[in-house]
Image (cartoon, rainbow, N blue to C red):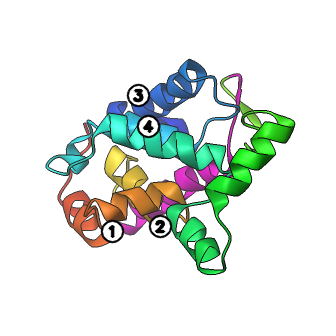
Amino acid sequence: MMIAERFTKEAREAVKAAVRDAERVHAGEVGVEHLLLALLDASVLAGFDLPRDELETEFRDYRRKGGLTKADAEALRGLGIDVDQVIDSVEQSLGSGVLRPGPRRRWFGMPLEPAFKKALEKSLREARDLGHNYLGSEHIVLALLQGKGIVAEVLTERGVTYEEIRKRAASARAT
């Protein structure tokens, strides 16, 4: 069975929606944050407080900072480096958004962030490890929680844990 055939309708639609979202906001590439935004209505995330507008703001800030998470910024602040001040100074000199990552491999006409591809690969492993013969949104969320960076950070901050999603995924059925 081909990989694309294993995707549930919800998971397939989430991947397509992530690409559309990246295009809508004129992102330089399709990132894992676009994938999370596309999964906000997934049944596996029901009951968690994940307000789209707050997440979009955090993701914009993350991109503006060249991929630094809050934890990264806090660590630098502990060393006496104010990331926001540095970025403001750089953008005043070189232009807005200069620290955003550049384009990478293309997928659906948009560059695909390596973390996005890695999340899909990990999703397949999650599905296999759970004994599922399909790849659903629950497997993608599990993969996102394993990653480093802003998506795992914002999910964890909002009480979405790998353990809880794994429990939900273990009882999930393909839709």
Amino acid type at circle 2 is Gln
Q: Is 94 left or right of 123, judged from the image as shown?
A: right
* Mark 2 touches mark 3? (CB < 8 Å): no
Q: Secondary structure at mark 3?
A: helix
Query: How many residues crowd around disc 4 within 10 Å: few (fewer than 14), some, or many (20 or more)?
Result: some
Disc nearest the viewer among 4 and 3: 4
> Which residue position is annotated with label 3?
13
User: In the picture, residue 94 is in which quadrant?
Assistant: top right
| Measured Cα–Cα span from mark 4 to mark 3 | 19 Å
Sequence order check, earlier mark of 2 and 4: 4
> Which residue position is annotated with label 1?
162
Q: Is 74 left or right of 154, judged from the image as shown?
A: right
Q: Position of residue 63 (x, y in %)?
A: 62, 44
User: In the picture, residue 130 is in which quadrant?
Assistant: bottom left
The C terminus: image quadrant: top left
* Mark 2 touches mark 1? (CB < 8 Å): yes
